[in-house]
Image: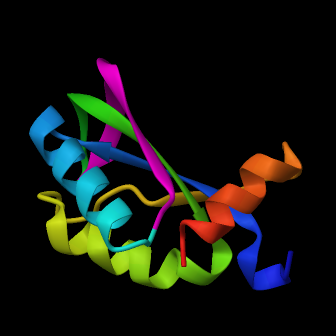
Amino acid sequence: MKNRDHVRIVLVTCGSTAEARRIARSVVEKRLAACVNVFPGRVESVYRWKGKVETARERLVLIKTTAGRLARLEREVKRLHSYEVPEFVVLPVESGSREYLAWVVENSQ
């Protein structure tokens, strides 16, 4: 696997299930990600926004992609997302099943 193909996990939170599903379908259809998990339960987020502490109930989305797709993936998430500043946090994958990682790479191109 080439360095640019190294698998990444991207965390995104969304304000609704519909928004999470819309983002998931779009990024998989455009081959920016091989797989997206939309967690069925809501997560409670506590954060500082514009000087105030806020609380929100959100959907957590887990996106499997490659390093080479990150820039386009981020643009697509921002295009479809309702938040002014959507969460887009990238985590490296240290290791995993060789077959699964190859599948992610193959389906994110």
Q: Quadrant of the N terminus?
A: bottom right
Q: Tell me: 45 left or right of 52.
A: right
Residue at x 48% of width, y 83% of height: 71
Residue 67 location (% of width, % of height): 66, 75
| Residue 16 seen from this side | no
Instruction: Reply yes or no: does residue 34 show up in magenta.
Output: yes
Instruction: Reply yes or no: does residue 50 show up in magenta.
Output: no
Residue at x 10% of width, y 40% of height: 18
Q: Tell me: 3 left or right of 32.
A: right
Task: Give the residue furthest to the top.
Answer: 41
The magenta region covers: 33-49
| Residue 34 seen from this side | yes
Q: Is residue 21 above or below residue 76?
A: above
Residue at x 34% of width, y 30% of height: 46
Residue at x 55% of width, y 66% of height: 107
Q: Quadrant of the C terminus?
A: bottom right
Q: Is residue 61 above or below residue 41?
A: below
Residue 37 location (% of width, % of height): 43, 37
Q: Tell me: 67 left or right of 39.
A: right
Given residues 56 and 8, the one toward you in this image is: 8
Residue 34 location (% of width, % of height): 51, 58
Which color scheme did the rendering employ for the protein? rainbow
Decide whether the magenta segment is chiefly helix, strand or loop: strand
The number of discs equals 0
Residue 88 location (% of width, % of height): 44, 60
Given residues 38 and 35, the one toward you in this image is: 35
Q: Tell me: 49 left or right of 89.
A: left
Given residues 92 and 21, the one toward you in this image is: 21
